[in-house]
Image: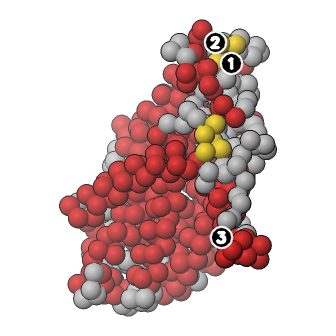
Amino acid sequence: MSFPWAKHYEPKQPLMRWLDEKLPLPRLVYNSIGAGYPVPRNLNYWWNFGVLAGVALVCQIITGVVLAMHYAPNALVAFGSTEHIMRDVNGGWFLRYAHANGASMFLAVVYVHIGRGLYYGSYKAPREMVWLLGVVIFLLMMATAFMGYVLPWGQMSFWGAQVITGFFSAIPGVGETVRIWLLGGFAPDNAALNRFFSLHYLLPFVIAGVIILHIWALHIPGSNNPTGVDVKGEQDTVPFHPYYTAKDGVGVGVFFLVFALLVFFAPNLLGHPDNYIEANPLSTPAHIVPEWYFLPFYAILKSFTFNFLWIPAKLWGVLAMFGSILLLFFLPWLDSSPVRSAKYRPTYRWFLAVLLVDVLVLGYVGGAEPIARNVILGQIASIYYFAHFLIVLPWVSRSERPRPLPTSITAAVLGKHGETDHAAPALAH
């Protein structure tokens, strides 16, 4: 989408004119996040989380690079080097806690960002590529977080690597070979630790590259908005700067406030105490659990307890766990409703609330002991998770009757009852 009313960069200083001619970096910044980039005038604070994800990534890269200067990826000394960072390196405790809690903050921000996309239909045309690149970023983040969790080489790190890589052994025929290839041996050891460290260091920069593509794809159709109505003219937009740079500044301030509370007052709140015990291959923890951001997917994995159609339960669990994420790639085509925002889709909004509760239940089951009651609860929640995307969503998108849409973003913003008094009929099915 082009914006003919957008302001164009015209440098006034000789130095800036020369730079703009030789390397148009100022023009790029101006047109990407400055006054030259018009955005819908009705964006709310839920649109802050894309910027917050970028801030969290920068924090992770900076703290991670410094931590890598002091960490030793060797099974004999990895745990000791982590304690060395905490006790002997100046400010090491802060860097380590900031990096560990920064991962949780990063994933939390991204989960909210995904939830906003689901509610406001940001995955719908013409923004399918923005959504698909976002899911790729999410997968890269999960891989990076898992490999980073292994590096402290505590009990939960070691056994987490043992369990997660063990999933690949469920693949018929080649599974065990793939697992040995990933680990560089028959069990997590020096080879695995070096590989995970190298990839954990590399992947954040890959994520940064995909984020650039994500933003580039976003700038082609422009941002979605709470009404889901397309921009119809200059009156529907405002410059990104100063309106949304100020609004994002508020969000960044709140983000760092919560971040500081975690780092300084509850640095181990989201961690596991067993990870302060050095890895011991001969002592299995009583209850192996991943980090909180993996718990819903771990619950889906654990929900398969019996073989079906000659396929082992373990393989079903692995396929379901990965399938629960891969489903998001098909979301733009599973939801065929022409109305984007759930604000005008009452039936869809109710089912989206049910999905949120379902994911929270899966998170609880993922961290709970695998007793019969929890297993049954996880199986019911897993069934609904897949049913929501494969059955409920296509049915709702074809059968529900959306509320009338506003004629424009301006009508919704300026009219006291703009969404009803100045409304246009919703698209019929």
Q: Secondary structure at mark 2?
A: loop
Of tags 3 and 1, which is closer to the observer?
A: 3
Of label 3 and label 2, which has the lower sequence position?
Answer: 3
Which residue shows up at 41% across the image and 39% down it?
A: 360
Of tags 3 and 2, which is closer to the observer?
A: 3
Name the residue carrying label 2. Answer: 422
Along the line of sight, which residue is nearer the eye, 353 or 343? 343
Name the residue carrying label 3. Answer: 13
The answer to whether residue 229 shows anywhere in this view is yes
Determine whether, in the image, residue 82 is placed left or right of residue 333: left
Residue 217 is situated, as x and y percent measured from the top left of the image, at 72, 52
Along the line of sight, which residue is nearer the eye, 291 or 160? 291
Of the numbered discs in the image, which one, if any, rests on residue 407? Answer: 1
Residue 419 is situated, as x and y percent measured from the top left of the image, at 58, 16
Q: Secondary structure at mark 1?
A: loop
Determine whether, in the image, residue 76 is placed left or right of residue 174: left
Residue type beneath disc 1: Thr
Question: Looking at the image, do the residues carrying marks 1 and 2 touch, with CB atoms under 8 Å apart?
Answer: yes
Residue type beneath disc 2: His
